[in-house]
Amino acid sequence: MDRIGKVSVFALGALLILSAHAPAQTLPTGIAGVVRDSSGAVIPGVTIEAASDALIEKVRTVVSDEQGQYKIVDLRPGTYTVTFTLAGFSTVRREKIELPAAFTAKVDAEMRVGALEETLTVSGVTPVVDVQSTSKTTVVSGEMLYALPLTKEMGGLAKVTVGVMIPPTAQDVGGNIDPMNAYPVIHGGHTGDNRALLDGMQFNGEGQGRGFYFNPSAAQEMSVQLGGQTAEFENGGFQANMIPKDGGNRFSGLISGNYANHNMVSNNLTQELKDRGLLLVNTTNRTYDANAAVGGPIKQDRLWFFTSHRVFGYQNLLAGDWANATQNTPVYTPDLSRPAVHQEDNISDGVRLTYQLSKKNRVNASWDFQHTNICLGCSPLVAPEATYTTKYADPNYLLQAKWTHLASNKLFFEVADSSLIFNWPNHRKPEAQGISILNNNTGFRYNAPLASSLGQRVASESNQRGSVNYVTGSHAFKVGFTTQEAWHHAWYDDGGPGRGIGAGLVSYTFLNGKPSTLIEYAEPVTFDERLKVNLGLYAQDQWTLKRLTLNVGIRYDYFNAYVPEQHLNAGPFVPARSYNKVECVPCWKDISPRLAGAYDVFGDGKTAVKANIGRFVAADIYTQARANNPVTRAVLNATRTWTDSNGNFSPDCDLPNPGAQNLSA
């Protein structure tokens, strides 16, 4: 069975002098161009050096090929000086070249006959259009991240990216809603194909969702790829990549903060609306975002560090939703002095190390711990006591490591690993120890949360990648692999040992203020899924022919997920249950070709036309495994009619007995 796939065709008209547009970081940031003499003839054998304080090794060196072309790849964002030298010619130096993330700067040189000691210096001329990359990407600088009053997440990045859509309910101002609710869509794609990347490594929760937030204080820049993914990636959707800061040879830091409260918020609550019964509108009570970071050398030119810290969150008031003044009774009475609050508080602490092991070997390692307290169940149709509290708590971290080996000025290797684990327990609030009640007339739930939403889930995911890169002036050939492994465990056992039926393993439905049905839950429930491997093998070549650049690639994907053997304990309404292992749900194999091109229209590096066509597979980790899990396919609740003729609001029957009974009691 083939994995679900899609074909993407993508074309861009003229990209005119737009410095924010560049290729994805998966095609490394770099500098490329052609070296000619004063007659216009190409010059092979020229030594080109790119120097910057952003490089821990200080300088990168290549040699132009037979066509006079050169490429310097895998550079860090920063300010560069490029020097061209060859015996018999005067030295040419290009200074103050600003290189953003995920951008290949076109830097050509014209060399005149003369002595090496003679130097021609050109300063401050920075290319603004990437005419060699075949992808379409927007780059958001760290300064812009801080300046714009938007969430520092994928949804916020989507707002500054032409053509990207996010749901209307995910629109925010200054971070006043949960940023994880924003799932951007580009070119009619699927939200599940979105990718959140840190230094090019995926950290999506469960493959498609989110488990971690971006930390803007740790970001050098953000690159947002809109389409035209190369063979390095399996999916064709929106990809947001945070390029982390590395520290440097001098100490530096930053402190920033944003805050707003209800005094800074206006509303349209008129006296006429108040007279009609509307006492409150949705409003922001407070929102805040504070960042601090510092970096520098542990040892000059050898070991750098960068540490970043962030606290942020919001508190919103929900219109028309109030706490229950008659809690733990069958009746909901709104307490107009206690409006419902939707609140989220987050803490993020991270550290990154960059170590130059030798002239040819570099290692990066980072660790990020995050803690989140959020009300995922908050809604205008749920009373505050019927919501559950979710705390992303220890263990909840992201680890990354990358090794780069520069074998020569043409050949380099890279191996990286990214591992994350996060858990999100859903707990009832202390005041909500009773039974959940649904008003079927209004759809409003009160008294306590549903038992089926209370429990805990833990997920872990590891991603690896490795590549061999052979770069000449005209070609950038790359072969590599990506792998992914993951596991997920969930348990819902709100009743728990000794808590009994009344502790939440039933819920009531009322119609016109009287009981009509009740639901029994088959808890405790536990279920597991495993991703054995998501393997990708690819080969690609970026080939420059004068003003035309082609990227040709092919990718092989193998996906294998399964459901392990599972044992469930007995509960008030169900016996103990056991389920056998389920293999190959699914086992997919796919071959996906990719072809893309970029053409420098006028040859001046200011206008490019780009197009690509390719086959991409759909994102997945547990979707198919969960759909075929015997636990999730089993009946997990049962609805029973209940009329409560004696009016005591208690089902006077033997609930564990599935047989017919007196349903009027």
Image (cartoon, grey):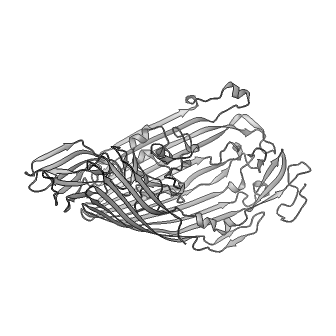
Residue in front for this viewpoint, 151 or 163: 163
Residue 414, percent across and down?
A: 35, 63
Residue at 82% across, 58% down: 640
Quarter where residue 554 is shown: bottom left
Q: Quadrant of the C terminus?
A: bottom right
Is residue 615 visible in the rendered structure shown here?
Answer: yes
Q: Is residue 120 above or below residue 61?
A: above
Q: Tell me where residue 425 sits by quadrant.
A: bottom right
| The N terminus sits in image quarter | bottom right
Q: Position of residue 68 (x, y in %)?
A: 19, 58
What is the count of numbered marks? 0
Residue, x 80% and y 55% (percent of image)?
Answer: 518
Instruction: Pick the residue in front: 635 or 356.
Output: 635
Residue 635 image offset from top left, x and y in percent? 73, 65
Left or right of 317 in this view: 255: left
Estimate the x, y position of residue 155 in percent, counting from the top left.
50, 46
Residue 152 in sight from this viewpoint: no
Who is closer to the viewer here, 277 or 401?
Answer: 277
